[in-house]
Image (cartoon, grey):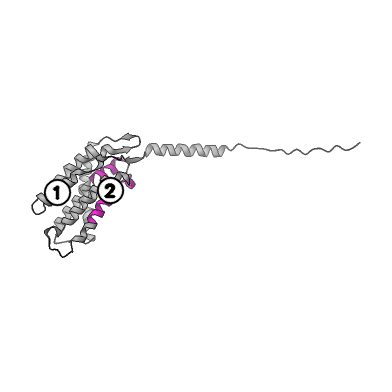
C-alpha cells in the first residue's frame, strides 16, 4: 500500500496586544487630565484689547504736564490700568472654554506685586546704563512705570496658572519700546525732552500700546 503523506499543518498562535491598548488609554487619560488641570489660554482678537488710555496719558505727559510730571503720570496710570484690566483686557481673556471673571482680591494683590516688580526692573535699568547716583529717584519712577504698564499681563500670569509663555510678549513689547527710545538721548539736539528718563517713559508707553493692541494676533 502506498504511504499516505501527511500534510503538515502550520499552527499559529496569536496574542491580543492588550498592552498597546492599555498604554493608549492611559496616555489619553493622562492627556485629558492635563488639559482639565491646564486648560488653554488665549486672548480674543478684538478691539477691546487696545489700551487707548495710554495714548491719552502720553498726551498729558508730553503736552499738558509741566516739566514732564512723571509722578502725576504714575498716579494716573495705576487706576487707569486697573480699569483697563477690569472692562477690557480681562474680558478678552479666555481660559479653557470660559471667559474669566475679574478676581478683585487678586487684582489688588497684583498692584502690590507690580510695585515689588519695580525693584528688579530698577536693577536691570541701572545695568543697562541708567545714571546710578545722579538720577536714581527718576530711574526708580521709570521702573515703576514699566512695572505698572505690565500690570494687566502680570495679573493674567497669576490668574491663569502661571502660563508665562503666553504673556511674555507683552513684557517684551514694553521693554523693547523703552530700549529703542534711548537712541534719542545722546543726540546733540539740546531739547528738553531728551533728558533722562523722558524718552524711555514715552517709548515704554508706546511699546505697551502696541503690545496690548496686537498681542492677540502674534
Give the farthest residue toward the right.
1
| Residue at image coords 19%, 39% | 83
* Residue nearest the observer in this picture, 129 or 209: 209
* Residue nearest the observer in this picture, 20 or 218: 218
Secondary structure mainly formed by the magenta segment? helix
Q: Position of residue 123 (x, y in %)?
A: 22, 57
* Category of crowding for the residue at label 1, using alpha-carbon neighbours closer than 10 angstroms: few (below 14), some (14–19), many (at least 20): few
Judge from the rendering whether residue 171 lies leftward or rightward of residue 6; answer left or right: left
Residue 177: which quarter of the image?
bottom left
Residue on which the image places disc 2: 170
Q: Secondary structure at mark 1?
A: helix
Where 137 falls versus 101 (above or below)? below
Q: Position of residue 138 (x, y in %)?
A: 14, 56
| Residue at image coords 34%, 40% | 41
Q: Which callout, 2 or 1, points at the residue further toward the start of the chain?
A: 1
Classify the position of the N terminus by image quarter.
top right
Would you say the residues marked 2 and 1 are in contact, meaning their CB atoms lie under 8 Å apart? no
Q: Is residue 195 magenta?
A: no
Q: Secondary structure at mark 2?
A: helix
In magenta, the rendered stretch is 151-179
Residue on which the image places disc 1: 59
Report whether residue 105 is seen.
no
| Residue at image coords 42%, 37% | 33
Report whether residue 19 is seen.
yes
Amino acid at each position: 500500500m502506498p504511504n499516505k503523506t501527511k500534510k503538515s499543518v502550520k499552527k499559529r498562535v496569536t496574542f491580543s496586544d492588550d498592552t498597546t491598548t492599555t498604554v493608549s488609554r492611559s496616555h489619553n487619560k493622562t492627556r485629558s487630565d492635563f488639559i482639565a488641570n491646564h486648560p488653554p489660554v488665549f486672548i480674543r482678537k478684538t478691539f477691546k484689547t487696545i489700551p487707548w488710555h495710554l495714548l491719552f496719558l502720553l498726551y498729558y505727559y508730553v503736552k499738558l504736564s509741566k516739566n514732564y510730571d512723571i509722578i502725576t503720570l504714575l498716579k494716573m496710570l495705576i487706576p487707569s490700568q486697573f480699569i483697563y484690566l477690569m472692562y477690557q483686557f480681562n474680558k478678552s481673556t479666555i481660559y479653557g472654554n470660559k471667559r474669566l471673571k475679574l478676581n478683585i482680591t487678586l487684582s489688588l494683590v497684583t498692584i502690590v506685586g507690580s510695585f515689588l516688580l519695580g525693584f528688579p526692573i530698577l536693577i536691570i535699568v541701572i545695568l543697562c546704563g541708567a545714571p546710578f547716583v545722579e538720577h536714581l529717584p527718576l530711574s526708580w519712577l521709570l521702573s515703576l512705570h514699566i512695572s505698572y504698564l505690565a500690570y494687566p499681563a502680570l495679573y493674567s500670569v497669576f490668574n491663569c496658572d502661571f502660563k508665562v509663555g503666553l504673556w511674555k510678549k507683552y513684557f517684551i513689547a514694553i521693554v523693547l519700546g523703552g530700549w529703542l527710545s534711548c537712541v534719542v538721548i545722546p543726540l546733540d539736539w539740546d531739547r528738553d525732552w531728551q533728558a533722562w528718563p523722558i524718552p524711555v517713559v514715552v517709548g515704554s508707553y508706546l511699546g505697551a500700546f502696541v503690545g496690548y493692541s496686537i498681542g492677540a494676533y502674534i
